Amino acid sequence: AELVRPPRNLYLPEDLDTLFTNVAKLLSEYLKQNYQESTPIQNYLGPDKLREAFNIKITREGSSFDAVINDLKDVLKYSTRTGHIRFFNQLWAGSDVAAIISEWFLSVLNTSMYTYEVAPVFTLIELDLIDRFCKMVGFEDGEGTFAPGGAHANLLAMLAARQHHSPQTRLDGLHKDQQLVCFTSKHSHYTIPRGAIVLGVGSNNSIYIEVDSEGRMVPAALDRAITQAVSEGKKPFLVNATNGTTVYGAYDDLEAISDVCEKHKVWLHVDACWGGHCLFSPKHKSLMKGCHRANSIALTGTKCFGLPQQCALILIREKGVLRTCNSMNADYLFHEYEEKSYDVGDLTLNCGRRVDSFKLWVSLKVYGEKGFEERTEHAFDQAQYVVNRCRQSNGVFELAHNPQSLNVCFWYVPKNWRNKPRTPERDAVLDKLTGLIRRQLQLNGKVLTNFADVPGQPHFFRHITCNPGASGEDMDAVLEEIQTIGDHLSETLAETQLGSSGQTSADQ
């Protein structure tokens, strides 16, 4: 029989040194430019113009890598520089070179996290990290797994809670006479009601609980809501507390919420995907006081530490829960070898799974827990710096809340509305200007921070201080750019959109 030969290979072994050297140099130059103030964060083009500027076409015959490298340069050119020292737009930012290098290793090794057989080193690394983080949160005999993002980690926690309260559902599904309900704060992440949809519980059975003025769940309101649900014949299966809300960065009171959950015998999950970094800081870890009383905790390594996407963990206080939830006993994959207990594939909803633990391990190996502590405290210090700048601005900037963590929410206030009481007219002006200024920030490309709102408040800037490469000068640059654009817009629009008295034309 004729031998079957592999398809053409464009890159012979003798070409690899040159190829990888050239690519490494390109990426190294890109990373160095992230630390230059003159480098724009964005070369922003709308979808139609970007489609014209960027060669997105694929041909039947393909191209040489030398030809494609020009397209890859354009990928860098037109992408948002999330590693830039003046990028504060998301709940993650910056670059960790150690973790980036780990990603190169993962691509070369190209394995999957399900059996010890195909990932022996990575299995030991992941299990060690899970054990380390379980002890960090106070789960002395806990378990866990890495997940492709915080949303997935939260979903695994919800699945574990459903298994705990309604184990037969795994086999028979939900029934009309079994109405499961979960509870989460009004400022929590949308992954909780979405998880309720995925589990068949339904978003209407994800009940929102009131928050206080700083965005923290009100434990007494939670107690009342659970009591009412039980009186209506419903079955509470999970309470989600948030440690680090998306907009305000608020930390729910875990001790008080734990009291309520223990009273009603309901699974307590803590979504600490954003705020869990405080555990590395002796100075700030009290924000998660009581986390050891939770049944599950979701954490991420990408938010505050600059690790590449994705890197999330779900920790469970009791061993064996994840396997009970997810195991399908696929004997074609999981063999009866002596190392079977090290096969971690049955702990998750995935079959194939990327080795997200490796980047966290490499970063911790390089910087140590001390380095993570320093990054955390640097982020908190930067937040306080911005708070102080706002308070000392003579009314140019006005805080929307008293920040607990790294989310500093504030308004730019035009001259004729500074240091004046809140009115509907004033709110309308601040709301409109925030949106206009933010859009101009994006188009200018010098700095980038985001904006948001909460019910009853005009839109405000939501500035996130987790960029490990940023300094006070970079924070100043953001505030100065906002003020420059805001002063110009408020003067330009005073006679038309905002009105000469500061009112919007619609209000006059």
Image: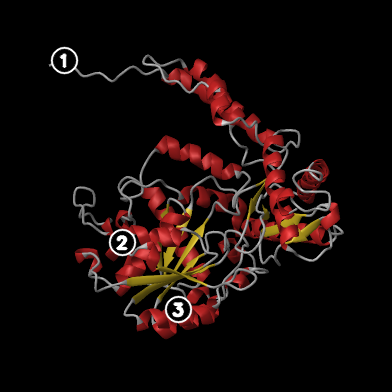
Q: Please, which residue is most extreme toward the left here?
A: 1
Distance of mark 1 from mark 2, alpha carbons? 54 Å
Quick check: 177 left or right of 155? left
Q: Is residue 415 above or below residue 41?
A: below
- What label does residue 2 carry, if any? 1
Q: Give the x, y percent position of residue 33.
A: 69, 33
User: Which image quadrant for residue 401?
Assistant: bottom right
Q: Please, which residue is most extreme toward the front here?
A: 508
How busy is the neighbourhood of tag 1: few (under 14 within 10 Å), some, or many (20 plus)? few
Residue wearing tag 3:
225
Quick check: 50 left or right of 467? left
Distance of mark 3 from mark 1, alpha carbons? 72 Å
Distance of mark 2 from mark 3, alpha carbons? 21 Å
Three-letter residue code for mark 2: Gly
Foreground mark, 3 or 1, reads 3
Q: Give the x, y percent position of residue 189.
A: 50, 60
Of the image marks 2 and 3, the number of the one nearer the N terminus: 2
Residue wearing tag 2:
200
Q: Does dot 3 land on a helix, a strand or a loop?
A: helix
Tell me the residue at 69%/58% (across/down).
409
Residue 312 visible to an observer of this rendering: yes
- What label does residue 121 carry, if any? none
Of the image marks 3 and 1, the number of the one nearer the N terminus: 1
How busy is the neighbourhood of tag 3: few (under 14 within 10 Å), some, or many (20 plus)? some
Three-letter residue code for mark 3: Ala
